[in-house]
Image: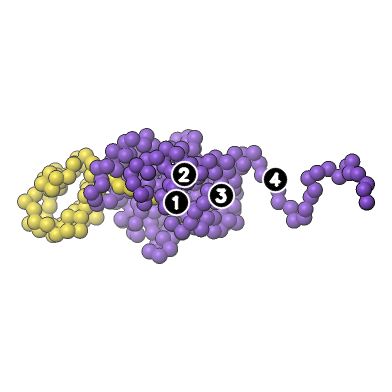
């Protein structure tokens, strides 16, 4: 399945958002996630299925003004 | 008082654009700031180091929605920030124009309404417009953050009379001048006008010596606040001799 992860098209075996984070090596407690522009809270990641072409954002604390 | 939190330092400091994480940490320390702003981004190489730095700074975090141009982006970013930073504080920015970075007041009020209802403590980046300010308060905001000048411009308080009017119009609302401050004197001026705090970033981060500038801003903001509390004299059109005329010798 091909999905869009942080603006890059990738091939993934993951079936859920939680699987994707571990497959891609994200430290789960340190990131926040959104699917197709909607926030997905941490407890909902394992119950959030990924479909072909879905847009996933995985964001981290960074510098800001 | 910002959402029940009393601050000793009235400087809120941004964490972007510093030459190194070490300089940032020293600048926070030198400024005396107790609140620092942070953002959410796709993680780059330095992400882990930044998390370590946040843990070291001991400051309260004010996550922002910088770069959001729509209601939806801003609301989603705020929800993500609350989870990852573990705070209900959010500096709500909804940008209306890419060049001026002027806030979009319509989307701002709508986003503030939704986020306040969800229990966020919203710090809205707004203009000095009084009606927008009233709408933000109606939406549930308990702090307003008018701009001094466009973000990163360093122009200082571009609409002094407008800010003065805003202060008078909202006497009991904490007001923070956010953005556009370029020099410590401008931050002091905002505090002398009676604003409750100043939020800035670029003026410190892009100084030749950011740590020295951070200290200067901390002191200027303290001086401006003390000046306001002490009560400024009224301006006069004409001169008025300060040395007494009584007892003046006749030497002519």
Q: Which residue is mark 4?
A: B233
What is the drawing colour of chain A?
yellow
Mark 4 residue element: loop
Q: Which numbered tag is attached to residue B185? A: 3
Which tag, 1 or 4, sits closer to the chain's start? 1
Q: Nearer the viewer, mark 3 or mark 2?
A: 2
Read off the chain for label 4. B
The location of residue B129, given as percent across then percent down, is 52, 57
Nearest the viewer among B200 and B137 is B200
- Tell which tag, 1 or 4, sits nearer the viewer: 1
The purple one among the chains is B
Q: Nearer the viewer, residue B15 or A8?
A: B15
Residue drawn at x 66%, y 41% is: B231
Residues at marks 3 and 2 on the same chain: yes
Label 2 Cα crowd, 10 Å radius (few <14 / some 14-19 / many 20+): some
Classify 10 Å Cα crowding around label 1: few (below 14), some (14-19), many (20 and above): some
Task: Please state if B167 lies on the left or on the right of B17 as rendered.
Answer: right
Quarter location, residue B238: bottom right
Which residue is under mark 2?
B212
**Mark 1 vs mark 4, CA separation in Å:** 33 Å
Q: Please provide percent x and percent y for residue B193.
A: 59, 48
Question: Where residue B77 appears, x then y in whole percent?
Answer: 30, 50
Q: Specify the subunit that label 3 lies on.
A: B
Of marks 2 and 4, which one's residue comes earlier in the chain?
A: 2
Q: Position of residue B242 (x, y in %)?
A: 78, 45
Q: Earlier in the sequence, mark 1 or mark 3?
A: 3
What numbered label is drawn on residue B207? 1
């Amino acid at each position: 399945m091909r999905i869009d992860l942080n603006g890059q098209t990738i091939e993934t075996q993951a079936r859920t958002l939680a699987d994707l984070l571990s497959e891609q090596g994200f430290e789960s407690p340190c990131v926040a996630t959104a699917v197709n522009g909607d926030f997905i809270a941490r407890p909902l990641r394992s119950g959030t299925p990924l479909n072909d072409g879905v847009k996933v954002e995985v964001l981290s604390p960074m510098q800001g003004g | 008082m910002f959402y029940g939190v009393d601050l000793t330092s009235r400087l809120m400091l941004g964490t972007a654009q510093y030459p190194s994480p070490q300089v940032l940490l020293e600048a926070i320390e030198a400024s005396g700031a107790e609140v620092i702003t942070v953002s959410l981004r796709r993680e780059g190489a330095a992400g882990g180091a930044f998390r370590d730095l946040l843990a070291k700074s001991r400051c309260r975090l004010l996550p922002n929605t910088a770069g959001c141009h729509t209601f939806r982006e801003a609301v989603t970013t705020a929800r993500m920030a609350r989870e990852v930073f573990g705070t209900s504080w959010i500096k709500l920015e909804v940008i209306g124009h890419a060049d001026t970075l002027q806030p979009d007041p319509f989307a701002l009020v709508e986003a503030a309404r939704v986020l306040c209802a969800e229990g966020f403590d919203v710090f809205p980046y707004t203009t000095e417009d009084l009606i927008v300010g009233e709408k933000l308060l109606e939406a549930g905001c308990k702090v307003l953050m008018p701009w001094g000048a466009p973000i990163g411009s360093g122009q200082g308080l571009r609409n002094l009379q407008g800010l003065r009017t805003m202060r008078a119009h909202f006497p009991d609302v904490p007001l923070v001048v956010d953005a556009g401050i370029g020099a410590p004197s401008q931050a002091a001026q905002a505090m002398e006008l009676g604003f409750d705090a100043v939020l800035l970033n670029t003026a410190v981060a892009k100084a030749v010596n950011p740590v020295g500038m951070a200290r200067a801003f901390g002191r200027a903001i303290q001086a401006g606040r003390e000046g306001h509390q002490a009560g400024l004299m009224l301006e006069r059109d004409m001169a008025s001799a300060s040395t007494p005329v009584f007892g003046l010798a006749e030497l002519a």
